[in-house]
Image: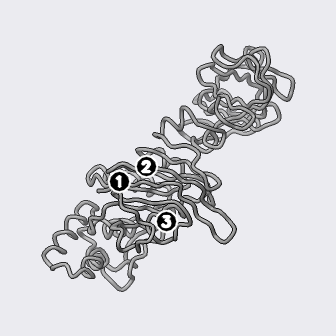
Amino acid sequence: MATMEIRSASKNYGTIRVLDDINLDIGDGEFIVLVGPSGCGKSTLLRMIAGLEEITGGEIRIDDKVMNALPPKARDIAMVFQSYALYPHMSVADNMSYSLRLRKTDKPTIAEKVGAASAKLGLDALLERKPKALSGGQRQRVAMGRAIVRQPKAFLFDEPLSNLDARLREHMRAEIRKLHRELGATSIYVTHDQVEAMTLADRIVAMHGGHIQQVGTPLELYDRPANLFVAGFIGSPGMNFLKGDIADRSLHLRDGRTVALPAEMPATMGEATLGIRPEHVVLSPAGEAGLETTVDLVEPTGHGIILHLTLAGTVFKVLTHDRRWLEPGSSVGVSFPAEALHLFNAEGVRV
């Protein structure tokens, strides 16, 4: 497998800079997920690592060898695309073995590698089929098998599950994670789906506006987001935010009400944003405790209920298992446990 180092990497399209000063170390056998909204630069970074995009500035190293000027075929990496990119006239076996046949690999070795990969991916019964006779999930497994037989230094995944339905995506996430444990392969995976990022990654690289916002384990980003972007993007539903000014160890909201702050937070700070995740909000009957508000919308999800409220002029969500507040228009009180609060300064940086 391989280690990777990305140093001060940048990418320009004409006068437009889409990636700026990207620095990242990837360990041997690590599963890294690049996550962020469309246009954040995550797929561009992946294509720069693959050699499909030229690097404008900085360096990309694989096993301490600079890759900047090397073509894709010289980098010894395999890429799995969103579109599968299978040859329609070839069987599953031929699609999987195509790169080996280009290298003039002998037939017994090809048969051995295709057989091992198809067994791992449950493709043994499909080897003679053409892609048109396969489901979306089966085609994606063939694309993964084609990458596996090459035994590359690293695997790159560019939103490989985007074309699948929700249940199949859930199944394929588990398959990819299981496969990674078996192969121990260095892997970089691009997605805009934060659930995929949380469930697959050893470490997540959260990106926005061509910059890396935070790098860490899934729970590090969830429990201690570095800024407002990460706090709002990681988690479903996303974190709630309340803006105001901090004085006398309280956040003074725009509607005149206050939220008491724990002792470890600043007593005075000026403009700030308080964050709390929907599952940490405590509900009570109106008038008993907390800030009183009204339920605007109810979303039963089966595993829980998402309540849409309005608090201090902004949408505020609560994830609860309590079915007392299933009717829109109900009045409720909301309070915030001190240990669940997150504080961000006027620039949006965690305090």
Tags 3 and 2 touching, CB below 8 Å: no
Residue 25 image label: 2
Above-or-below relation of 145 to 262: below
Q: Residues within 10 Å of mark 3 (few under 14, many from 20)?
A: many
Of all residues, the one furthest to the left in this rendering is 108
Residue 275: % across, % down: 67, 31
Provide the secondary structure element on which disc 1 rests: loop
Residue 230 image label: none
Q: Please name whichever residue, 300 or 36, is drawn nearer the observer in this view of the structure.
A: 36
The answer to whether residue 292 shows anywhere in this view is no
Residue 283: % across, % down: 67, 23
Q: Please name whichever residue, 20 or 31, is drawn nearer the observer in this view of the structure.
A: 20
Residue 141: % across, % down: 35, 65
Above-or-below relation of 139 to 278: below
For residue 321, side relative to residue 275 (left or right): left
3D distance between C-alphas at marks 1 and 2: 8 Å
Tag 1 residue: 3
For residue 226, side relative to residue 243 (left or right): left
Q: For the residue marked with disc 1, what is the amino acid? A: Thr
Residue at figure coordinates x 53%, y 38% from the top left: 221
Tags 1 and 2 touching, CB below 8 Å: yes
Q: Quadrant location of residue 222?
A: top right
